[in-house]
Every structure is written in structure tokens, then in C-alpha cells.
Amino acid sequence: MFSAGNPRAVQARAAVLPALAPTLRFSAAIGALLLVVPALVFAGDTGPGRIDRWVQHLVDGSAAGGWDLAHRVDWLGEPVGRTVMVLAVAALCLVAKRPALAATAMVGIGAISVLTTVLKPIVDRRIHDGFLSYPSGHAAVVTAAAMVVGLLLADLLHAGAVTGTAIVLATVVLGGGLTVWAQIALTAHYPTDALGGFGCALLVIPLTAAAIDHLVRLRTVRPTRNGGTPA
């Protein structure tokens, strides 16, 4: 058994505030559902479903005059924009002295990029003359970056469970919702493709943060022969 040592030292370096651990577990569960269920329902499809047509109609009615904004948001999911976004978010975390959260941003968004690429041919859903579309990598990476920013803000404000959850939710809804809208407005993806990308971020970022925090604890709290911790 490890001794308690100095838990505040460990928590200060963690990617996720302990108070937000239940929130991220719930996020991962919701994310898994949003990613897996549409993948099973729309696997092999080459056209929109009923929900897609309904949502597309709603977005088309709200997108007038928003093309410039949609294209700017879409750029964040492109290779260059994605790289700039990840480095910027990681830099913010490092400036705030949250290296574990910086690692979460880089490793998590990198993992999301790989996962969305791998899933596309497996799900084999197509749009626009055969382009693989599920899940939306653009929606996934921007939502992931927004979640990391929310976790950083919650940490800097020393938020409790309720306030911290509200902060993370607000950033995810704002950043993720905006990029989901952009993908639908530009008809780059079916709405359910964007939803799957959104879910991918909700799943992968909490798992990545949990893994990194586990490594942080292993490196910070080391057992000695008598069961204590080193000075």
C-alpha cells in the first residue's frame, strides 16, 4: 500500500480535478453510445437517414450568411489547422503549468485522428460520390480541444464538481456544437457523422486523461521498502 504522502502535489499535476472524475466517466459512457450506435445503424449506407434529412433542413435554414464562419471552423479540422489548434491548446496548458493536461491534448487528439481514420473504412458510410464519412474527424478533434480547454479552466478556477461540470459542458457545447454545425452547414458530413465525431471526443479525451493521470501517480508516489514514500 502506498502512504498518503502529499496528495495535493499529485493532484496539482493531474490532468483532471478529482471532483470531475465522475463527470468524465459519464462523458466516456455517453461518448461511446454516440460513437457506436450510429456506426451500427448507418454502416454501409450511401445516403442520409431520416434524422439526417431533418437536421440538415434545420441547419440549412440557419446557415444563411454563416458560410465564412463555417469555413473558418472547418479549417481547424484540416491538417494544418488541427496542428495549430493542438499546439495552441497544449501551449496554454504548459503556460498554466498543467503538463499532464498538455499531454492529454496532444496524445488524445492524436489518438482521435487515428481512430476516426481507422473507423471510416470499417463503418463504410459514404457521401459525395463515395467519400468515406463516418465519423467526422473535424467534429471529433475540435470537440476534443474544447473539452481540454474546459478542463483547464475548471482547474485554474479550482472549481468543484457542479461548477467544473458546467464549465466543461459549456466549452464542449460551444466548441463542439459549432464545429458540428459547420460540418452540416457545409454538407461535408451527414449530421449523424458529426454526432459520431462529437461522441468520439467525449470518449477518448476522458480515457486519455485517466491513463495519463495514472502514469502521473505512478511517477509521483513511489513506494519504498518500508511502505512509505521518498522525501
Image (tube, rainbow, N blue to C red):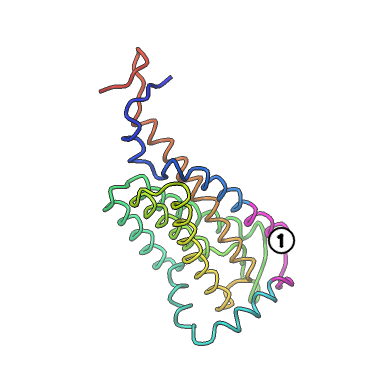
Picture residue at 57% right of the left edge, 82% below the top: 62
Residue at the (36%, 44%) spot, across then down: 100
Q: Position of residue 126 (x, y in %)?
A: 66, 69
Residue 55 lies in quadrant:
bottom right
Image point 71% across, 70% down: which residue?
51
Q: Residue furthest top?
A: 226
Q: Amino acid at mark 1?
A: Ala
Inspect the magenta stretch and tell me whether residue 36 lies in it: yes
Quadrant of the snapshot with the N terminus = top left
Pick the residue in front: 51 or 83. Answer: 51
Give whichever of 170, 73 is nearer the camera: 170
Residue 63 left/right relative to 107: right
User: Residue lying furthest bottom in this view?
Assistant: 65
Is 84 rendered above or below residue 184? above
x then y, percent, for residue 11: 36, 38
Q: Quadrant of residue 63?
A: bottom right
Image position, residue 50 (x, y; %): 74, 72
> Does residue 176 sit above or below 200 in this rendering?
below
Q: Quadrant of the C terminus?
A: top left
- The x and y percentages for residue 74 are 47, 72
Q: Nearer the viewer, residue 90 or 46?
A: 90
Total labels: the figure holds 1
The magenta stretch spans which residues? 33-51
Q: Callout 1: helix, strand or loop?
A: loop
Density class for disc 1 (Cα within 10 Å; few <14, some 14-19, many ≥20) is some
Mark 1 lies on residue = 43
Queried whether the magenta region covers residue 72, the answer comes back as: no
* Magenta-drawn stretch, dominant element (helix, strand or loop): helix
